[in-house]
Image: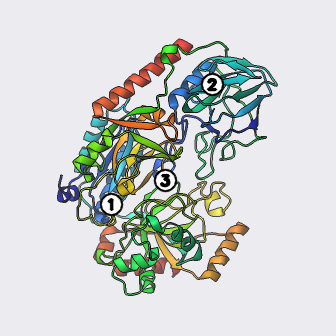
């Protein structure tokens, strides 16, 4: 298969005996993502016996199947049928979602300490992850790169890795999107609540652990709460905060505000601020900056 | 109740796993060697799905405060009750005050202890399995420590000593394990030579081998050069982030394949070259650092046949033990 084919044709494949993997495109784009979402939603509605779990992701999706109830090849036929019926992105598709204010400290001391320990696994052993990201994305200064990271909101296009981690795709035209490689070999250590970037995706690591994303900053507020101690988690009866389809506005904070949020978390009083809204992919694609400004107006109004 | 006198190295409560939350990042967790786990429950007369203890390398020392029935399965390791060696893969009566201990591991990596009624810890997202990476499930979200007291469930179906697994069904744990691999996913990213090298190599288990995944060393693999698709990142091992099947194999940097197990990370952006057939993860779970593993390619029909054979054997064993 050539690279061109891999980028344009839907690939159906088997992940062992229990998973079917469907790649709608090798490249990320919002239209492809919403097609994946439309297919997985339809699949969920059809409740086909033997379909055990449905995992939509950025430009692909995955289904866990019970092969004793549904032959994986029969599942592929069903998925191909649904893909044909759903078609490509429809202009009137809207997604009920919310826009969330997420404080973030970029170029923070905690991720800096960790990333310096793992230079031997990085593309650029002599610099920092932020300097490297700025350079390969054509920014003249690291500060300008940092400004771009926080300038526009992101859409949660995938959840996972560990519970609650959101993959966030920045809502800007492709020529303004940041893109970086993952580490050459993953780190064995990442601080809790680190803000990372890999490919075209920003993430927050819910807990400490291994990780391969470039480390750019740190979020003061938790996105995973195993004991549901904070009201955002207790009231929703969930250990994770973010949901697929959330819009996140990363708002830069300084050390003082970072520490203030940490104190609210420790006191058990921290709450995210968010507003509900309807996201229209076609409207966004027609007017990205106008749509972003309107969404921020809803949030901060 | 069970009182933990010595926890061993990393002993956790596990059951069949936490299914249904993969899309928000919860791996299934659950017993790594599902055959040993299921046979243990059948031997002591539990319903399938009762929680048991999974140890690794070193067995725990456990004191029982009630008369009950236990079975030790999994790794080849001598087990003792009050200093007397007991048969493994066989249900054994223990009295209140008895102490279960273990000798040195002979082969395999993970012994299991099934107890009549199962280990009674709270259900967390539908399962009693421990997921230590984020500290949830099982006994307080962590591996056991000395002094922990584990409650036992009361709903054993038919606890009875003296049930024994037929010797022909007892798994052997060779130091080179063979597992079946369905090649695919992003295997087209590797050169043909490298894919062939992957299945020709005896891979050595590194010290970085745990319930999340096993890392191997043994050969270098090369990726096909390409202009990377948007979103993936520029490293040739990168793909646009996607879901990882449990059992999938990724090769960051081309030198260190990682096979994901029951505490898998559920997605990420490294190219995967295929997936180990689900029932063969049992075999990987019984390999330890320094052991070797060969990945034997199968097609989908072959994978389903391997699965059918193993699950059929388990059904036959369960019936025979009822």
In the picture, residue B115 is in which quadrant?
Answer: top right
Which of discs 2 and 3 lies nearer the camera? The answer is 2
Q: Decide if residue B222 is on the left or right side of residue B127.
A: left
Q: Is mark 3 on a helix, strand or loop?
A: helix
Viewer-proximal residue, A223 or B88? Answer: B88
Residue underneath mark 1: A33
Horizontal relation, residue A6 to residue B9: left or right: left
Which residue corresponds to mark 3?
B24
Q: How crowded is mark 3: few (under 14 residues within 10 Å), some or many (20 or more)?
A: many
Element assignment for label 2: strand
Residue depicted at 59% across the width and 57% down the height = A236
Marks 2 and 3 share the same chain? yes
Label 2 to label 3: alpha-carbon separation: 35 Å
Callouts 2 and 1 on one subunit: no
Q: Name the residue under label 2.
A: B72
Separation (CA) of disc 3 from disc 1 = 17 Å
| Tags 3 and 1 both on a single chain | no
Q: Can residue B98 be seen in this view?
A: yes
Q: Where is residue B86 in the image (x, y as percent from the top left)?
A: 68, 18
Q: In which quarter of the image is residue B43?
A: top right
Residue A73 drawn at (x, y percent): 27, 36
Residues B182 and B81: in front is B81
Which of the marked residues, 2 or 3, is nearer the chain's N terminus?
A: 3
The chain under label 1 reads A
- Crowding at label 1, few (<14), some or many (≥20) Cα neighbours within 10 Å? many
Query: Which chain does the numbered disc 2 sit on?
Result: B
Mark pair 2, 1: CA separation: 48 Å
Q: Which of B211 and A55 is in front in this view?
A: B211
Within the image, what quadrant is residue B49 found in? top right
Viewer can see residue B47: no
Indicate the chain on which mark 3 is placed: B
């Amino acid at each position: 298969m050539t690279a061109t084919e891999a980028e344009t044709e839907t690939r159906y494949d088997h992940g062992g005996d229990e998973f079917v993997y469907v790649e709608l495109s090798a490249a990320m784009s919002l239209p492809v993502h919403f097609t994946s979402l439309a297919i997985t939603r339809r699949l969920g509605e059809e409740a086909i016996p033997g379909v055990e779990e449905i995992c939509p992701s950025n430009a692909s999706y995955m289904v866990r199947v019970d092969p004793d109830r549904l032959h994986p090849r029969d599942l592929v036929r069903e998925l191909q049928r649904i893909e044909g019926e759903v078609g490509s992105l429809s202009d009137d598709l809207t997604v009920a979602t919310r826009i969330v204010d997420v404080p973030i400290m970029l170029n923070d001391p905690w991720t800096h300490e960790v990333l310096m320990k793992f230079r031997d696994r990085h593309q650029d052993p002599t610099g920092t992850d932020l300097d490297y990201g700025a350079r390969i994305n054509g920014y003249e200064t690291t500060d300008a790169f940092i400004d771009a990271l926080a300038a526009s909101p992101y859409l949660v296009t995938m959840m996972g890795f560990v519970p609650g981690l959101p993959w966030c795709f920045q809502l800007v035209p492709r020529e303004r999107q940041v893109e970086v490689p993952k580490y050459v070999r993953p780190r064995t250590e990442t601080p809790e609540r680190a803000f990372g970037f890999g490919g075209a995706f920003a993430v927050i690591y819910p807990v400490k652990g291994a990780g391969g994303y470039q480390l750019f900053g740190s979020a003061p507020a938790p996105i995973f709460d195993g004991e549901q101690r904070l009201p955002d988690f207790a009231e929703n009866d969930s250990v994770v905060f973010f949901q697929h389809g959330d819009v996140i506005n990363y708002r830069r904070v300084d050390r003082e505000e970072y520490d203030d949020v940490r104190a609210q978390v420790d006191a058990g009083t921290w709450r995210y601020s968010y507003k509900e809204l309807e996201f229209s992919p076609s409207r966004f694609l027609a007017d990205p900056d106008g749509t972003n400004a309107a969404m921020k107006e809803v949030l901060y109004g | 109740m069970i009182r933990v006198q010595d926890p061993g190295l990393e002993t956790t409560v596990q059951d069949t796993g936490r299914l249904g939350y993969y899309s928000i990042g919860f791996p299934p967790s659950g017993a790594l060697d599902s055959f040993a786990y299921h046979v243990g429950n059948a031997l002591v007369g539990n319903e399938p799905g009762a929680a048991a203890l999974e140890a690794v390398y070193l067995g725990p020392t456990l004191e029982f405060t009630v008369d009950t029935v236990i079975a030790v399965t999994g790794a080849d390791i001598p087990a003792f009750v009050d200093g007397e060696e007991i048969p493994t893969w066989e249900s054994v009566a223990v009295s209140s005050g008895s102490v279960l201990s273990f000798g040195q591991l002979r082969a395999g990596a993970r012994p299991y202890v099934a107890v009549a009624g199962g280990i009674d810890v709270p259900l967390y997202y539908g399962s009693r399995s421990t997921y230590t990476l984020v500290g949830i499930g099982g006994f307080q979200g962590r591996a056991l420590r000395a002094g922990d007291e584990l409650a036992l469930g009361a709903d054993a179906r038919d606890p009875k000593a003296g049930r024994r697994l037929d010797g022909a069904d007892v798994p052997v744990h060779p130091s080179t394990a063979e597992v079946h691999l369905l090649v695919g996913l992003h295997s087209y990213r590797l050169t043909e030579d490298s894919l062939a090298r992957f299945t020709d190599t005896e891979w050595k288990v590194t010290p970085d081998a745990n319930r999340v995944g096993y890392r191997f060393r043994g050969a270098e693999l090369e990726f096909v050069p390409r202009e990377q698709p948007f979103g993936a990142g520029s490293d040739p091992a990168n793909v646009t982030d996607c879901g990882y099947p449990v059992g999938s194999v990724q090769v960051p940097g081309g030198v260190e394949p990682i096979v994901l197990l029951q505490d898998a990370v559920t997605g990420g952006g490294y190219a995967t070259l295929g997936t180990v057939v689900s029932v063969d993860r049992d075999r990987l779970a019984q390999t330890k650092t320094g052991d070797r593993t060969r990945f034997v390619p199968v097609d989908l029909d072959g994978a389903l046949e391997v699965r059918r054979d193993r699950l059929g054997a388990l059904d036959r064993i369960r019936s025979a033990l009822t």
